[in-house]
Image (spheres, rainbow, N blue to C red):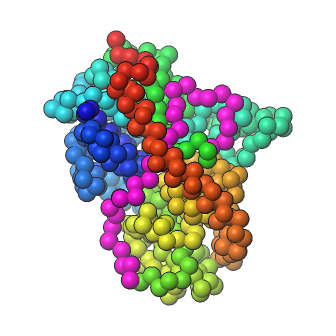
Amino acid sequence: MANIVIAPLYWQANINVTFALARKLRSCGHRVLYACIPDTEERIRSQGFDFVSIFSGVFPPGTLAQQAANEAAGKYLGAHGVNARVQTMCKLCRDGEIARATRNFGPDLFLVSNHLPWVGIGSWKSGAPVLMFSSVFVSTPDSMVPPISSYTIPSSSLVSRLKVFWEWRKTMVRRTLLTRISGLWRSSAYLKELAFALGYSLSEINFDVAPWPRLSLPELVFFPECFDFKRANPIRGLFHVEASVDVERKDNVFPWEKLDGRPLLYCSLGSLITFKYLTAAKHFFQILLDAMRMLPNLQAVVALGNYLKPEDLTCPDNVILTDDAPQVALLKRARLMVGHGGGGGIRECMFYGVPLVLCPLGFDAPGNTARALYHGVAVRADFREASAPKLKAAIDQVLSDPSYAEAANRMSRKFVEIQSQMPSIAIIESVLAGRLKFYQCA
């Protein structure tokens, strides 16, 4: 059996999506080791997995909590800070950081987040096969599918194709101007320097992908293709696989005795919105609480994150406020989720057949929302301009019209069936057996 290293980004959604796969790999007899920054060790070990630190000089313990506190206070890292981190990580990868950290484990394969192309190249240089993975849809120019930042629901008509073409042109121009003006282009320059130093061909890197350049290595996308729009041109080396929802995930303790049997609404804005947009999040939560006051026949659980406290809000009796909720366990009971359109929330809702009210905020939220609307599993509300009556009307619409629950249940059956098949395992074992050919280390 094989030794497999999983290297996720430190974002919670990017880590969570690997747990179900990691458990399945272990049940197949493989050994699994996580390689990530020090602040993720407790989370990963709590799920029963082995761990090794990488980039501890760039992200010493406490870095993520300090960054979140700074951003909650309006002090952002900025392009200069991002560039400095990327530059140092690229230098460390050039100097053998990944091989050094995992040497005692003897990796037979690396599974690396597509948010970390420098780790992908550093792992590739070790000589072991490398698979990339994504917890979000991969967005590359296509004549049929708009950018992930777009609310457009495409069709096969000429008008739709022209609109998609125009949106891609705007997106690429905007991205070019932003990277030049902000200085973020330097991150791509550091990646190019790393690739040149380690012998990874620049022709094997696509720089027209958000949020980071995409390597030519095979990539698993933990979002079933049935939820995506149909592309005109398939992305080379990309495999849509199961949603990888970890039904055994161990999350925070929750006062289950407070649930009283009324239909349950669950609300979360993910792990980033609640500190990156603290003021807007507080305003939105209060609007939801005001809407819940007008919905006494429902009960809600609202996950506030770590930078808002229950005393910051006026809460009705039919709402339970918590800092971090056991999302998977709550979705098993929920009739509806209110969220910001992040991939993790949508993926887990579809797995459990839970329709949504989506108030999109974040880079992939518009595209995720467009897909949810297309499949009839959600309605959209405006995050920044929502009012309690409008949010109540959206909740009433989803709960009173059975078509939303029916569509979510149809999608759930597909998600559960695909997860039972675990196509990612077959792809990984094909790589290990040398049957999947791709760009190799010289």
Q: Position of residue 349 (x, y in %)?
A: 54, 60
Magenta span includes 254? yes
Query: Which quarter of the figure has residue 108?
Result: top left
* Vertical relation: 91 (above or below) 334: above
Number of marks drawn: 0
Query: Observer-nearest residue: 28 or 366?
Result: 28
* Vertical relation: 322 (above or below) 77: below
* Vertical relation: 97 (above or below) 44: above
Give the residue drawn at x 38%, y 45%: 21
Magenta span includes 178? no
Q: Residue furthest left?
A: 104
Q: Position of residue 164 (x, y in %)?
A: 74, 37
Give the residue drawn at x 38%, y 83%: 257
Residue 139 in the figure: left or right of residue 428:
right
Query: Observer-nearest residue: 60 or 178?
Result: 60
- Residue 343 in view, yes or no: no
Q: Which residues are magenta?
A: 228-257
Give the residue drawn at x 48%, y 19%: 204
Give the residue drawn at x 61%, y 45%: 226
Q: Position of residue 293 (x, y in %)?
A: 59, 85
Q: Residue furthest top?
A: 442
- Residue 344 in view, yes or no: yes
User: Is the stretch drawn in magenta largely helix, strand or loop?
Assistant: loop
* Vertical relation: 338 (above or below) 110: below
Query: Which quarter of the figure has residue 294?
Result: bottom right
- In the picture, the quarter occupied by the C terminus is top left
Query: Observer-nearest residue: 266 or 409?
Result: 409
Q: Position of residue 167 (x, y in %)?
A: 71, 38
- In the picture, the quarter occupied by the N terminus is top left
